[in-house]
Amino acid sequence: MISADPGKPQTVRPLYHIFTRIPGRYDLINHVITLGMDNGWRRQAALACLQDRPARILDICCGTGDLAITIAKLAQYTPEITGVDYSQPMLEIATAKTAASGGNIRFIKADVARLPFSDHYFDCIGISFAFRHLTYNNPLTPIYLNEILRVLKPGGRFVIVESSQPTSPFIRFLDHLYLRLWVFHSGYLISGNKGAYRYLAESARNFYSAVEMQGFLLKAGFKQATAKRLFFGAAAVYTAIK
Ligand SMILES: C[S@@+](CC[C@H](N)C(=O)[O-])C[C@H]1O[C@@H](n2cnc3c(N)ncnc32)[C@H](O)[C@@H]1O
């Protein structure tokens, strides 16, 4: 694993503490709170990333590496794949998992606010279940978006898989109940970190709908933004073109 000096951390401290304290059981909790659907949703994002056979792919906020690893497994060729995250414990798990799966992915410790890559370096950038953390009540959102746009080449794709809002009011009600009861309680019980799972459930309940997210991406400077709803709209895969 390469460690890029992130310099003076330009980051939101409470969030940083959440993601350096929950990694031990992070994968297990993800499967439990999404009722086992997270891998299938990441697979959809990986397929969207690979659509134009990009040569260089970046997984930002890669966590334990699942999106990068899925992309490597699904690619019928050998793209250059890089994962970045600012949580050292997450990256250690990602590195061990990649070694076990025989994949060829480099992991770099870095903050999205300061990506250690030259302008227009990547053909595709993917992010799974972390865009919400970069943009939900986060004062650093403009800095993150600028960095993503800077390292993505013109015409390149930005693929996001994230929780969303079901369009049907009844299903949305059930989804919010599930977030409040199941996600918060099971996440807290398994991780022991009450604050982390309160934040995760609350931010998911209040995050953008698919239509709002498309508007947000266009306003951020992308030329096109499409959405593919998953599981009645509880999650979605977005593809934005620079
Ligand atoms: C909910 S996890 C998602 C991890 C992974 N992408 C997945 O699909 O499971 C969010 C990740 O984003 C990382 N993260 C949050 N803000 C970040 C930032 N500003 N720079 C780098 N990593 C960040 C956290 O350390 C954490 O690993």
Image (cartoon, rainbow, N blue to C red):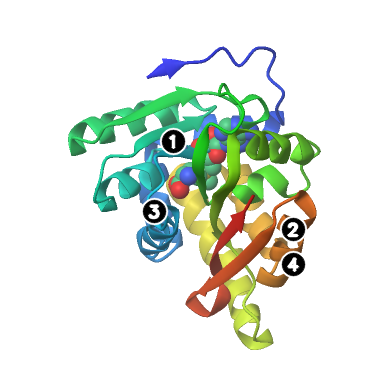
Position of 176 with respect to 33 (left or right) is right
Q: In which of the image's four quarters is ligand 1 placed?
A: top right
**Residue 192 visible in the current orientation:** no
Is the CB of mark 4 within 8 Å of ligand 1?
Answer: no
Dots 1, 4 in contact, CB < 8 A = no
The amino acid on which the numbered mark 2 sits, given as a three-letter code, is: Leu
Total numbered circles: 4
Which badge, 3 or 1, comes first in the chain's sequence? 1
The amino acid on which the numbered mark 3 sits, given as a three-letter code, is: Leu
* Up-down relation of residue 187 to residue 175 (above or below): above
Residue labelled with disc 2: 218
Residue sitting at x 44%, y 36%: 23
* Up-down relation of residue 82 to residue 220 (above or below): above
* Up-down relation of residue 10 to residue 32 (above or below): above
Residue labelled with disc 3: 50
The amino acid on which the numbered mark 1 sits, given as a three-letter code, is: Pro
Using a 10 Å C-alpha cutoff, classify the residue at mark 4 as few (fewer than 14 neighbours), some (14 to 19) or many (20 or more): few
Label 4: element kind: helix
- Residue in front for this viewpoint, 33 or 44: 44
Which badge, 4 or 3, comes first in the chain's sequence? 3
Label 1: element kind: helix
Position of 42 with respect to 130 (left or right) is left
Residue 212: numbered disc: 4
Residue 23: numbered disc: 1
Q: CA distance from mark 4 to mark 3?
A: 25 Å
